[in-house]
Image (tube, rainbow, N blue to C red):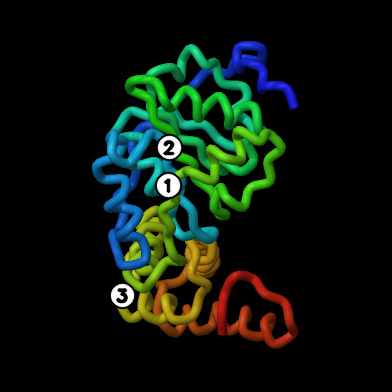
Amino acid sequence: MSAPRSLRDQMRLPLVREAGVAPFVRSPANALAVDALAGWPNPAAGPVMALCGPAGCGKSHLAAIWAERVGAIPLNGAEAALADPLELEGRPVLLDIAQDADDETLFHLINLAQQDGGALLLVSRPSPRRWSVDVPDLRSRLDAVRVVGMEAPDDPVLSAILRARFAERSIAPGEEVIDYLVRRIDRSAAAAAEVVERLDAEHRPVTRALARQVLGTSEDLFEDGVGSGLQP
């Protein structure tokens, strides 16, 4: 297969960095990743790192905090092919949903990360070693990338996510409500957002009794074999 063509031959997409990232809760589920990114990039760890974990574990959130700290340019999946490489040279880059980027884009981003001031953080659910690629040189480079894993949210992280989603709606439930929900919803940010939305839709004070009522609907669904991201 011929060498990947330059990103300069592709469309240009203006790069905009989002301002302000919410705080991140450190816990045993993410401590290794938090520590790995705390002092990176640095020569000892290499210019490319992959942050991997299940859906809703907070990897994109942690990566965004890293990007804000180091001034990285954020790219997203297949849209990374539209970036102007001149804007990326000598800059840290965050590539979220990295497994969706095409081989040529990944190849060039890894090359750019080798330059002074460059770094590349790849964020995805599966490890780069499991990505399907066709370029042999890219395969060997991805296999050599340092991979840092995150686990599904544990109790402290899920509690923090629930509080944040409630706070966005100006709701301040008691700790007994948070504890009740933590024990019964899927361990993901999406499940937390879903249950908060459903509780808010009741337009009543959010109590444990209301939480039990709202989750009761999902319990019936699960008995029928239909899941909605909530556990009985």
What distance separates the C-alpha of mark 1 from that of mark 3? Answer: 41 Å
What residue occupies the far left of the structure in this picture? 39
Q: Earlier in the sequence, mark 2 or mark 1?
A: 2
Q: Give above or below for 142 relative to 26.
A: above
Give the residue type that dot 2 points to: Val
* Precedes in sequence: disc 1 or disc 3: 1
Residue 125: image x %, image y %?
A: 55, 54
Instruction: Report x, y in % for residue 27.
Output: 30, 65
Label 3, on which residue?
A: 174
Observer able to see residue 171 = no
Query: Which of the 4 quarters of the picture holds residue 216?
Result: bottom right
Image quadrant in which the C terminus is located: bottom right
Q: Nearer the viewer, residue 16 or 33?
A: 33
User: Which of 137 and 98 lies nearest the eye of the viewer?
Assistant: 137
Neighbours of disc 1 within 10 Å: few (<14), some (14-19), many (20+): some
Answer above or below: position of 26 versus 60.
below
In what element is the residue under mark 2?
strand
- As helix, strand or loop, the secondary structure at mark 3 comes to loop
Q: Which residue, given by chain and number where applicable, does mark 1 sit on?
A: 146
* Residue located at (36% from left, 73% from top): 155
Residue 212 in percent (x, y) is at 49, 84
* Image side of residue 92 versus residue 223, left or right: left
Question: Are the residues tagged 2 and 1 within 8 Å (C-beta)?
Answer: yes
- Frontmost residue, 121 versus 205: 121
- Residue at image location 49% in from the left, 80% down from the top: 184
Residue carrying label 2: 48
Mark 2: give few (<14), some (14-19) or many (20+) Cα within 10 Å: many
Is 58 drawn above or below residue 20 in the view shown? below
Residue type at mark 3?
Gly
Of residues 206 and 142, the one drawn nearer to the viewer in this rendering: 142
Marks 2 and 3, how far apart in space?
A: 43 Å
Q: Which x, y percent locates residue 169?
A: 41, 56
